[in-house]
Image (cartoon, helix red, strand yellow):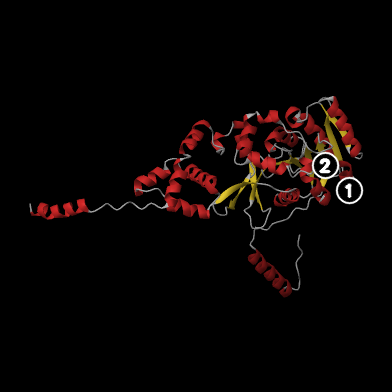
Amino acid sequence: MAIITEQEPDQQQQQHQPKQPTKTTPNQLSFCLYFTLPISLITLYYLFTSSPQTSFLNLPTTLRHHYSNGRFIQLQTRPNQQPINIFTFQPPPLTPTPSETVLILHGQALSSYSYRNLVQSLCTKGVRVIAVDLPGYGFSDKSLQVSADGFDGFFGRVTYVYSQIREKGFFWAFDQIVETGQIPYEEIIKRMSERKVSKPIDLGLEEIGKVFGEVIAALELGSVHFVLHDSALGFCANWVSENSDLVSSLTLIDTGIDNLGAFPVWLLEGDANRVLLKAGDGRKAVVAIGKNLNSSFDLAEWGGSDGLKDMPMQLIWASGWSEEWSREGKRVAGALPRAKFVTHSGGRWAQEDVAIEIAEKISQFVLSLPKTVRKVKQESSIPDHIQKNLDEANSDDGHDNHHGHGRT
């Protein structure tokens, strides 16, 4: 009773005391709006669209097999920027120690996956074959993480909240509300100030050319035979003419004189190619890099440059695609008069139509040329400091022993 009696005055005083209104800052109110408004849209997005991220187990079987047989190379294309992972596809050669190496470069919107059958066919011809996914294509990186400066307004905040939900799960914010009793406003604002955003890769022709040189150096390929399909010449024309010592020969497959290439819409209907373009910022990267192709490229001028005067060159052309395309082939042959001109029975994407036929023509041309002499760097398994001590010991032994010993 005493306890109840003592509490009654307090309770009466509390009834007469006006309630203090809860202090709510404008920032918290605006954040509530930013957070709650897109929730329904995000829910619908998760229900009716698939994630662009392609995990290994979700890939089609053929694409999963292609991925398993490849390897990644990390390249630094720009200073003060994260390295780019470049995917290379290189099946083991079916003949011992092939002397010639063929490097296949894809055209716009394609990848090394499109050339898998051509690569396998060439491996049976006694050459080493490597196909590369250019930055922004195939399994190579399609985007970079860059620092975001400040807030991007309403849509920037909504986008960031959406990215946090994708990263932490749809009910992450609700869990925070249940645990703490408030929206995790401070944490999200702090994260926004330190956040990084994904930016599609956008490399110029000079930077893409640098990729070729670094791939050749990383794999210790020495001089290689370039096989360029469709618009691939536009990516590497300048680099080839400036680095002719690293190019044993050139084979151009259905490369138009304007070098614009043909976007293979029908290939994108295939599930594997759709997945590759959908992953990450694939489509954006393809568009960004495609805009950097030189639309004023002069094929005849390029073919007559000093670096290509003595370059063995072959032009493989679709003979039955169309009359217009056959006339285009004659124009290209006229612009490259020193190139060997041969035809194939497939369409403009011969690597899919007639891979075996194309492989035969490439291998015949490559193997008809003088053998490439490759300088192989011998690497010692002994650490440098130990090797130095051994060399000094052998030198001292040689000075002490005046009889000397011959080495074999």
* Disc sitting over residue 250 in the figure: 2
Would residue 307 be found to the left or right of residue 142 on screen? right
Place of residue 225 in the rendered image (x, y in percent of width and height, measured from the top left): 80, 43
Q: Residue furthest left?
A: 1
Would residue 344 be found to the left or right of residue 191 on screen? right
Query: In the picture, which quadrant includes the C terminus?
Result: bottom right
> Where is 391 relative to 284, above or below?
below
Q: In this rendering, which labeled residue sits more in front, label 1 or label 2?
A: 1
> Where is 122 relative to 11, above or below?
above
Disc 1 and disc 2: Cα gap in Å?
Answer: 14 Å
Q: Element under label 1?
A: loop
Place of residue 215 in the rendered image (x, y in percent of width and height, measured from the top left): 71, 49
Q: Nearer the viewer, residue 56 or 71?
A: 56
Q: Residue at x 86, y 32 (%)?
A: 329
Is the residue marked by circle 2 packed among few (<14), some (14-19), or many (20+) residues within 10 Å? many
Residue 168 visible in the picture:
no
Task: Give the total of numbered labels.
Answer: 2
Answer with the quarter of the image where residue 104 lies.
Answer: top right
Answer with the quarter of the image where residue 237 lies.
Answer: top right
Q: Residue at x 69, y 43 (%)?
A: 288
Residue 103 visible in the picture:
yes
Would residue 205 be found to the left or right of residue 23 on screen? right
Disc 1 marks which residue? 305
Place of residue 262 in the rendered image (x, y in percent of width and height, measured from the top left): 76, 33
Q: Nearer the viewer, residue 209 or 73?
A: 209
Instruction: Specify the amino acid type for callout 2.
Output: Leu
Instruction: Specify the amino acid type for callout 1.
Output: Ser
Place of residue 312 in the rendered image (x, y in percent of width and height, measured from the top left): 87, 43
Q: Residue at x 67, y 36 (%)?
A: 113
Is the residue marked by circle 1 packed among few (<14), some (14-19), or many (20+) residues within 10 Å? few
